Amino acid sequence: MIDSMEKNNHIPFDLVASHPNQWLISDVDGAISAKALPQSDLYCNPKNGFAATAPSVLNALTLMGLPLGIDLQLSARVDVDFNSAYDAGALLVWSDERNWVKLCFEFSPDQEFMVVSVVTRGASDDANSFILPVSHVWLRISRLAHVYAFHASTDGKIWKLIRAFTMGEDVSAHRVGFVAQAPVGDGCQVTFEEISFSYTTLAELRDGS
């Protein structure tokens, strides 16, 4: 899944694109954007259990890199030009093809704007969260030692806990970054703005900070 190297002034490590020349990074404000490829997704179907041969789709556009520290926070405002069900922009943590997680802003089959989380450990555990009235949201991934926390916000200030979990004690090879997907459609435009990354520890999971 490695093709080209990108830099962003808001992120202190190199980002690697899964598909060359698909991502745009603004020199002005650091915004990252891409048009998702048709019928593209990151998903390991739980229908067939945890077998290595279980069907999965891992062709979504990704842009990610390897942080140098342990505790961290990555956040962005995510805007999606929704067209078809499951179109989404997401933040990503990636270990390998069978172990990864994403926090998505997704278009539901009922044509609603929804925050969705997917935790994949062999098979994908897909969980819907809350619905929004507008086609943008702020998403955040935090890592506290070996614990990950997903948060979302409607204003970029007050954060709602979506999920807290672990991907194992060793996080040294976990890459973080961005996803643009269109699992059943012809593609959608995804933009990540107001990107923030820091090697800081989130003090409290549930107090809105």
Image (cartoon, rainbow, N blue to C red):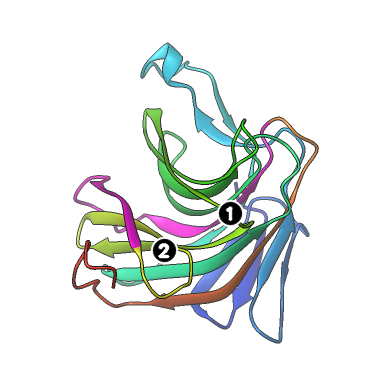
Residue 175 in the image: above or below residue 97: below
Q: Secondary structure at mark 2?
A: strand
Query: Callout 1, which amino acid?
Result: Pro
Q: Position of residue 204 (x, y in %)?
A: 19, 68
* Badge 1 density bin: few <14, some 14–19, many ≥20, Cα 10 Å: few
| Furthest-top residue in this view | 48
Give, as a single range, the part of the protein colored magenta: 160-183
Circle nearer the N terminus (2, 1): 1
Residue 75 placement, left or right of 180? left
Task: Give the quarter of the image for residue 108.
Answer: top right
Q: Position of residue 93 (x, y in %)?
A: 42, 52
Mark number displayed over residue 133: 1
Q: Position of residue 206 (x, y in %)?
A: 22, 62
Query: Is residue 174 on the magenta stretch?
Result: yes
Q: Secondary structure at mark 1?
A: loop
Residue 195 in the image: above or below residue 80: below
In percent of the image, x 28 and y 68: which residue is there?
Answer: 208
Which residue in the protein does label 2 denote? 140
| Furthest-front residue in this view | 133
In percent of the image, x 52 and y 32: which residue is there?
Answer: 43
Residue 196 in the image: above or below residue 150: below
CA gap, disc 2 and disc 1: 19 Å
In percent of the image, x 28 and y 73: which residue is there?
Answer: 209
* Badge 2 density bin: few <14, some 14–19, many ≥20, Cα 10 Å: many
Residue 80 placement, left or right of 94? right
Q: Position of residue 128 (x, y in %)?
A: 43, 38
Residue 76 placement, left or right of 3? left
Query: Callout 2, which amino acid?
Result: Arg
The mark closer to the camera, 2 or 1, is 1
